[in-house]
Image (cartoon, coloured by chain):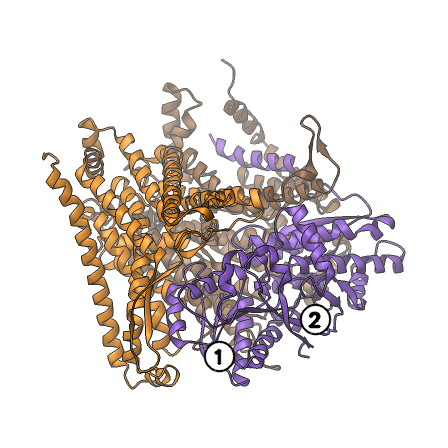
Amino acid sequence: MKPTLRERLGVLLAFCNKGRNPYWLTGGLIILGFVLVYLSPRSIPAFLLFVGGSSLAYFLEMKKPARLAFAVLVAIVLVPILGARNIFYLEVIFQIAVFSALALGLNIVVGFSGLLNFGYMAFYAVGAYLWGFFGSQQPFLLHEIPGTAPPGTPFFLAPDWFYLFIFLGIIVAAIVGLILGLPVLRVRGDYLAVITLAFGEIVRQLLNNLDKPLNLTNGPQGISPIQKPTLTPEVVAFFNQIFEPLVGRPVTANQFYNILFYLIAVAVVIFVIIITFRLDDSRIGRAWTAIREDELAASAMGIPANKLKLGAFAVGASFAGAMGVLFAASRTFISPESFTFLASVNVLTMVILGGIGSIPGVIVGAVVVTILNLQVLQSISLWLAQLRQSDAFIPIINFHWKDLSNQLDPSKYQRLVFGIILVLMMIYRPAGILPAGRRQRELEHVDSVIDDEVDSSIAPGAASSSGAVSKGKEDDHV
Amino acid sequence: MRRSILLFPAILAVAGLVLAGCGAPAPKVIKIATQSPLSGGMSAVGTDIKNGAQLAIEQLSGPLTKLGYKVELAPFDDQGNPDTGVANAKSIVADPAVLAVVGHYNSGVQIPSSEEYHSANLVNISPANTNPKVTERGYEEVNRICGRDDVQGAVGAQFAASKGLKSAYVLHDKTAYGQGIAEYFKRQAEQLGIKVLGFEGTEEKANFDSILSPILSAKPEVIYFGGMFDQAAVLYKQARQKGYLGMYLSDDGFDASDAAKIGGDSLLQGAGTYFSTVSGPASVYPGTAKFVADFKAKFGSEPQPFAAQAFDCAAIALKAIETAAVAAKKLPARADVTKAVRALKDFPGITGPVNFNNKGDLVKAKYFIIQVSSGDPAQWSANKIDQTLEIAPPQ
Amino acid sequence: MRKILASEALREILLPLGRMALFVVGAGALFSAIMFALAFLAQGSGADKLLLETHKMGILEYTLGQLPQVLIDGMTLGFVYAAIALGYTMVYGVLEFINFAHSEIFAIGAFVGVEFLIFMDRLGVLAAAGPLGSYMYLVLALAVAMIASGSVAVLMERTAYRPLRNSPRLVPLISAIGVSFALQDVIRMVESLTTGQFYRVIPTFGNFDERVALFSIPTGGAPIAVNIQVKSIVVIVAAVLMLVALNYIVNATKIGKAIRSVAQDRTTAALMGIGVNGIISFTFLIGGALGGAAGVLYALKFTRIDPFVGFMPGMKAFTAAVLGGIGNLTGALLGGICLGMLESFAGAYLGTFTMGRFGSEYKDIFAFLILIIVIIFKPSGLLGEQVSQKA
């Protein structure tokens, strides 16, 4: 019998994982990607190669210290250098980090405990407005016309309170999460989804409306300027001392802020990842899974379902709160427009695309969606725009690019792309690109059974749908 | 077997192949980037900001072509979202061929994005950001050719007072733009002795029933709407249908022939409809009529508000690049273009002569109060100027 | 097993009419009573004094003067919500699934109907049509929109929902959100490819914009005229007709009985020889058609539509469906009317009573709060005992 594509890929994978090959491959690809990006800072294939090579550190089989070493090398050394040369990549990776944290938080609610939350951006907004309010002049502007400040209005807090506010953001968002979590005690499934949607919309409208009677949020005008943490010239000088030869030019303080926020975001994400892994492997994580699979049975086994569901909401919210504070400081401006239903669905898309309940999956989801959104769709549009301004045409049908309608730019159809992704994922691969480990084990088990009886071309769909957010009661690991 | 993991590199590979076409730019290409919302609910205006700039580049890049440069438009979609806007800004900044940015539509996106332009010395000319904060930061790179909310709102109030009106009801669309104008209208109106009977914002696009009840009972002499025509005209029409006969007054967001398409004759009934604008009608600026005709020929629809401003922004950018290129005798640096924009004197834009002050505002913006004189969209450019006011921005 | 008799059929027509009248009067009376109580308590407050100054009337008088118009507006809006809510409720009743994309079905209906009218307008026949002719074109537009929306709804069910029918509940919900987003952009693409703009304005035709003066209320100041627009009457009449027709189909026909049996127990219904797939498709067809008709009525009433027009009415209609008890047709009607009234009251009085501190911008927040409160405290809704056994 001819080997199927899957088998061929399997052989390839086996080769990649043989002996020292993983180390050579990963290291080689990272270096190759790095050099290519370094030489041609605007080439997107080079950037994708770099990202892909870095991700091999996770996917291939290697020893833990080696994985860590690769991760540290990429995150702390290579990315800042590339970022200093082309700050766009730093922004992309910064947003990947921010959205990874958000997606991981949402994953705790949706993936671990099976509670659908459509208002997740509300918690992000809580964090952002927390620092937005206290880290700006806003407390002195309660009676001003929204959007105006008398000259010389002082800032309410010193900029370095920012670091404390990251932790305050965690706490406050967690409290708001608890409040929203209260309905969870009574409502399940799609009703909960609708409640959270309504909640998210209420928060956004409140932010939009609370410029009177007391001007708390500046309403649609948004709050600005919001302070960034201080940056001493010594730090910038220190960075330049080490990296200037590599970057090729000195980095200014303004550019260094990008690196600073990137590093803070990475720190927060690492913190979030560690917590998520620990939770997943803990009694709490297993209890969440039990609740997700069958709440009644879980309660009967003595799991305090209500407390744990509230906990899931609080933990998920707290990640978003921390990232919200970071967002406010890095943008220096926030307005209610950033916290729409679309934004919540965006994060949900990441979770679903990557794999509900799967920690690496969710991160992959965040990477794919962010790159798709910021780079791929935009680049195709720009490319089309270039074509449209040239004399090029498609030969056979004699179609001049000039005649291509402006309305067909892919970047205009972000919603269409994400909508189709959601539908296709639900139909063909509801467990996501990287299904959660526990489910994957179930899947492999199912796979081997099905492979024997059914044509393997049908198997993937059948297998993954049976392993999806399953209501089944294969309580093997719980 | 971990077959799933192969999917991800596969996606990357496909994406890479797709993008292989967009490599490094050819030498001597100059790009002018636009940033505006091309997707989502605001894309009607955002797309026409891009189209306006595109038209200017196609029509006016002759001098630069003679100097041996190819001028290209690089349209970015900021989605009306600061995250995307900032990311795009960084992408723009990282492309050395980009010498000017025309954009944004939302002040909420412009303010964080322009921090990036500022740190890269890249000039940004805004067609539509009327929020005072845009220029109040005093960045050399940030300019705008539209008015400021704080001025335009006040202009509207002065006009209302000059007509002897005694009471007003103020509405806005709950965007930074509309609310800003409405707030200043209210403040100025109260100073001029006009009684403001109510002040409300609404995100509603179609159903104004519940908002209109208290307005109708308050019987204001004028309803002021801060926001865009697509909301204002609907509101005006519904108010007339409910029997309101007072005056309508709005801002330059109302300056679109589609306003007449929506509002129809209801705009002429009662005390009529007026709006303030910085871009004069065709009778004052002959360029406007040509622009509208060209725009319709190329894109098949009437230009939305700010399309003409975007045209001017791109025209200014082209002129400044040309000046800088001639002075430098080579591809000019971004900082040179930035300086050249501020140095322009009496640039003949289709929306009026352009002179920037040291903050990037127009030195003296001409504000027109225009009366809608026909319910026929085709007659929009024949609207009458009722008053002309020249006002310098606050220093 | 009972046979459907002529008298029975008549009953199924008269009963919902009676219910509707009861709901409208009841909800109107309830809200009016609450408003009067508030106005009574607010006498002598700052708001009262402000009104005396600006309107030359006290708060009690003001409330009374506004009331008829507010009730009429609320009722119109309520019937639009009810018509959309029926689509949610039918699908939920049969599949126990929130068809999130119903708001886009509504938008598609609005666009198809309006495009049809625009086309007729361009042909010139619309302006030439007499009073009777204009109603004929409206009915035609409604029919076209109902066919289009119904077919899209059926297509949507076949492609995006049917493959997921036996999945856990969240899976089709996420798929529905995907469909909803995709459809928004598809509408936008289609509309903007033809004209460059993606919003549409319904052409002015017929006598729909005229107002019928009902009566006027003498007050301390100028008398307040109460009137109703012709198109509001059209909206109400059309919605009532649709509601009655739907009620008749579901409760008094054979296919209606099949729908009810599928809703009750899909497996057993299949065992009884009912083609479950066909019935589910039919449910989507009816729900979609109703949504499409509601879209045209919405466009007629509020003139301007864009591809995102469905989101808020969709959310409100869903709230209405939940408020009345999702899965329950009468409940959707009651919920719609209550919500329309609530919104109208909040919009009209909130600003006055709080002296402008809070305005009508809070009306959406009210609607969502109601949704949350109902779901938490009475998830079966006001009339929804049928669902609660199943949930």
| Picture quarter with the C terminus of chain A | top left
Q: Quadrant of residue A379?
A: top right
Q: Colour of chain B?
A: purple
For label 2, the SS is loop
**Residue beneath disc 2:** B361
Residue found at x 74% / y 40%: A390
**Label 2 vs label 1: CA separation?**
28 Å
The three-letter amino acid code for the residue at tag 1 is Leu
Against B89, is A38 above or below?
above
Of A195 and A52, the residue lying toward us: A195
For label 1, the SS is loop
* Chain painted orange: C
Disc 2 is attached to a residue of which chain? Answer: B
Q: Position of residue C131 (x, y in %)?
A: 38, 50
Q: Position of residue B42 (x, y in %)?
A: 54, 55
Circle number at residue A142 = 1
Q: Colour of chain A?
A: brown
